[in-house]
Image: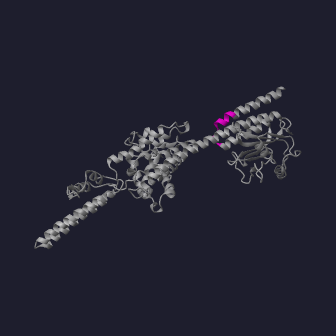
Amino acid sequence: MSELNQQQIAQRLQHLTELSLALNGLADTNALLERILQTAKKLTNADGGTLYRVNKEKTQLEFDIAINDSLNIHIGGSHPRVKDMRSIPLLDENGHQNLQAVVAYAANLKQSIRIADVYAADLFSFSEMRRFDELNHYRCQSLLTVPMLNHESELIGVLQLINATAPDQGQVISFTETDQGFIEALASQAAIALSNQELIYQLENLFESLVNLINIGIDEKSPNTGRHCQHVPELTMMLAEAVHRSDLPVFKNFHMNERDRRELWMAGLLHDCGKITTPVHVIEKSTKLETIFDRIHLIDTRFEILRRDIEIRYLKMAATQANSSEVITKMQQELAHIDSDRAFLRHANIGGERMRDEDQERVHLIAKRTWIDSNGVQQHLLSADEVENLSIKAGTLTAEERKIINNHIAVTIRMLEALPWPKHLKNVPEFAGGHHERMDGKGYPRGLTGEQMSVQAKIMAIADIFEALSAKDRPYKTGKSLTESLDILGKFSLNGHIDPDLFHVFVKEKVYLEYAKKFMDSAQIDDVNERKIPGYQTPSHLS
């Protein structure tokens, strides 16, 4: 072997080594394919090359990328693809192996094909190649076609090179046996890399499907929470992209690549996974007295018994007294008072943003009324548990039920921290587990301050609150308008609840409107006067 040949072999080994290292670091399939074909061309000094991959059904070879230096052609990879590039069938119309096309032959028989002059070869049909030559005033001559087989000898694709050229003179020469050996080694490396990449892709899709399976489980328990689990990640990504685009100095170090986006998206999907352990009657509690059913109906029954007893008592009195009309009037007055109390309790049972102190006191006074049960025993009109529920200051949950609801985030963190996250998803527990923390340290479950939270966790906190405010499908409230939602969120930015800088981007970049158009009812989308939104201004450190 001459010194020149030894040098060429060393160069080729270097190219293979560089490709091997590159294959481990390229996550983008298009970039990976382009690197494979470019290296193959460089190894053999080929003028052109094409790479095909087998489809999922193992019936076709689908065109992926083609490069020709003389014709200045580069299709696929980092360049646009041509839609009309034909796939090559692996089977003919009778279901037999297609052995007419050289790439199909190499794929079906898993054999490399080396031809010195395609125009002189009669084993294969080169009609497409001849047509290409005519259209482009080109001459395909030497050809090397190599199947790409992974470690299990499964077909991944086919690599085809044309017109090897002499390094010095530039004339077209035949591909050598050495060329074939190097390209077969390269094709094997490439096939394994593509298989590994596909396996990783499948595993990631499987994991995301399992995450969606958890959300389906939550959805079956609570359709309302299920939609929340889908909308929050969407809004999270909208705000994160706005921050990524922002030129505000405070966010100059916040940037996302595709892996960062996937990590945040996964955290969004899992942010409430702990709710799978939350009792349905707590999640779906639409009124203060609701458990398995709304207990206001039991109280209605007591009122009916109370009314009946009052009517009987007064009617007996009227039958024995001369001034029966006065007795009837007093009865009607007492019944009206009873009806007023019952209507009040029905309204109190609905829940709301705030219950007045005097209304809470009235619940306690009504509770002191007595009625006679079916056993003839005198009972208070309301039990201690009913008084506690009907006196809830805001919403429909008692303090104990609120603890149960809030515990979902602690469960979420425990569930997520128990998983062996790969490096590129290692922050999922922190992002998902921080969406109920507050800037002032008054959040839960860990009482973190804004300085201790990632930007991603603070983004998710805003998404979680805004989705809850605007959602129209909650069992305990109606959806607020855009203006109302932004008004509340703006006040949260002023009182230390959410990050004011992120809220500024949320409004300035109109993330709220992007979300509203996609998920909110049109009746909720009113004209927002941004100048009136609390907390929306341009602090000096933002401008």
Residue 508: image location, x then y, percent: 48, 52
Q: Give the farthest residue toward the right.
A: 120
The magenta region covers 20-28
Q: Which residue is located at x 38 percent, y 45 percent?
A: 406
- How many marks do you count on the picture? 0
Q: Residue at x 15, y 68 (%)?
A: 316
Horizontal side of 324 relative to 156 (left or right) equals left
Q: Quadrant of residue 358?
A: bottom left
Colour pattern of the rendering? one colour
Q: Main secondary structure of the magenta part?
A: helix
Q: Position of residue 41 (x, y in %)?
A: 77, 39
Visible residue check, residue 539: no
Q: Is residue 329 left or right of residue 430?
A: left
308 relative position to 64: left or right = left
Q: Is residue 59 magenta?
A: no
* Residue ID at (68%, 49%): 57
Is residue 514 visible to the viewer in this orientation of the structure? yes
**Residue in the image at 35% along x and 48% along y:** 401
Front in this rendered view, residue 202 or 433 = 202
Front-most of residues 319 and 515: 319
- Check the image and name the residue furthest to the front: 375
Q: Is residue 23 magenta?
A: yes
Tell me which corner region of the image, top left, top right, bottom left or bottom right, holds residue 295. bottom left
Q: Classify the position of the N terminus by image quarter.
A: top right
Q: Position of residue 376 (x, y in %)?
A: 20, 57
**227 relative position to 362: left or right:** right
Q: What x and y, as percent, mark residue 156?
A: 70, 42
